[in-house]
Image (spheres, rainbow, N blue to C red):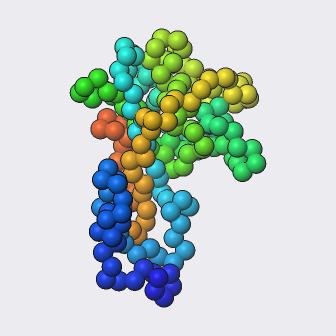
């Protein structure tokens, strides 16, 4: 590292790292980070996608349920509790989408400012219950009301194999997206468009 924690100039870090990584993991770009940069706490937003095989789920009902996530809510009923390290369960979801892809694969996409432990997998699990007709779309809104539902119901998070962290937004990183983020998926509903629809 150079002065002020800057990376030394002249090294081709993507090539060096790609030389030791397995072929299904690639580094596309690298840039020096400013002093004080923290990959977790300097992140402006995170965009996740959860993929699942289409087994007859009602995607329209899943989308209807997913829209309840948009905005700032207490997500304690949609995470794995970590009471030793977390006291604030409020998080802001910026956009969501549920859609199908060719080949029988479906996607739940969500973009938010920050997420709790296993939050996206818990969100996906409840949406899948809705898609299978085991729950109604309004269940999401009910579980976000922690006054009425202070204890998380028993359900397993969706399988970890379908979860992908697609993007992270940073200020001042030359190749990283910054603010505002693109809507989740291609048909996501952002906070701005949701607010416009309400007005």
Residue 143 in sight: yes
**Residue 156 falls in image quadrant:** top right
Determine the residue located farthest toward the right in the rendered image: 84
Is 62 or 52 nearer to us in this picture? 52
Question: Which residue ends up furthest to the top in the rendered image?
Answer: 133
Percent across and percent down for residue 107 are 36, 31
Left or right: 167 as drawn, with respect to 159: left
Instruction: Answer yes or no: is residue 174 visible.
Output: no
Total numbered circles: 0
Quick check: 87 above or below 105?
A: below
| Residue that sits furthest to the bottom in the current view | 3
Q: Which image quarter holds the C terminus?
A: top left
User: In the displayed structure, would residue 110 be above or below residue 42?
Assistant: above
Give the residue at the far left of this rendering: 102
The residue under the point 46% across, 50% down is 46
For residue 191, side relative to residue 12 (left or right): right
Which one is nearer the viewer's eye here, 143 or 27?
27
Q: Residue at x 54, y 14 (%)?
A: 135
Image coordinates of residue 177 in percent, x first then y, are 36, 59
Q: Which residue is drawn at 50% across and 42% down?
A: 93
Question: Residue 26's x, y, as percent?
Answer: 32, 57
């Amino acid at each position: 590292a150079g002065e002020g924690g800057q990376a030394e100039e002249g090294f081709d870090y993507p090539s060096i790292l790609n030389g030791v990584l397995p072929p299904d993991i690639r580094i596309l770009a690298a840039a020096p980070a400013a002093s004080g940069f923290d990959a977790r706490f300097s992140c402006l937003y995170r965009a996740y996608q959860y993929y699942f095989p289409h087994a007859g789920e009602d995607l329209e009902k899943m989308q209807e349920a997913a829209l309840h996530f948009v905005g700032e809510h207490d997500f304690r009923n949609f995470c794995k509790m970590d009471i030793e390290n977390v006291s604030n369960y409020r998080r802001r979801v910026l956009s969501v989408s549920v859609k199908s892809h060719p080949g029988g694969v479906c996607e739940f996409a969500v973009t938010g400012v920050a997420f709790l432990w296993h939050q996206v997998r818990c969100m996906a699990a409840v949406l899948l219950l809705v898609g299978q007709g085991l729950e109604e779309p309004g269940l999401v809104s009910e579980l976000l009301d922690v006054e009425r539902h202070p204890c998380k119901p028993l359900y397993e998070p969706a399988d970890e194999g379908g979860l992908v962290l697609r993007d992270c937004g940073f200020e001042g990183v030359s190749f990283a997206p910054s603010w505002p983020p693109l809507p989740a998926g291609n048909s996501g509903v952002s906070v701005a468009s949701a607010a416009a629809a309400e007005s």
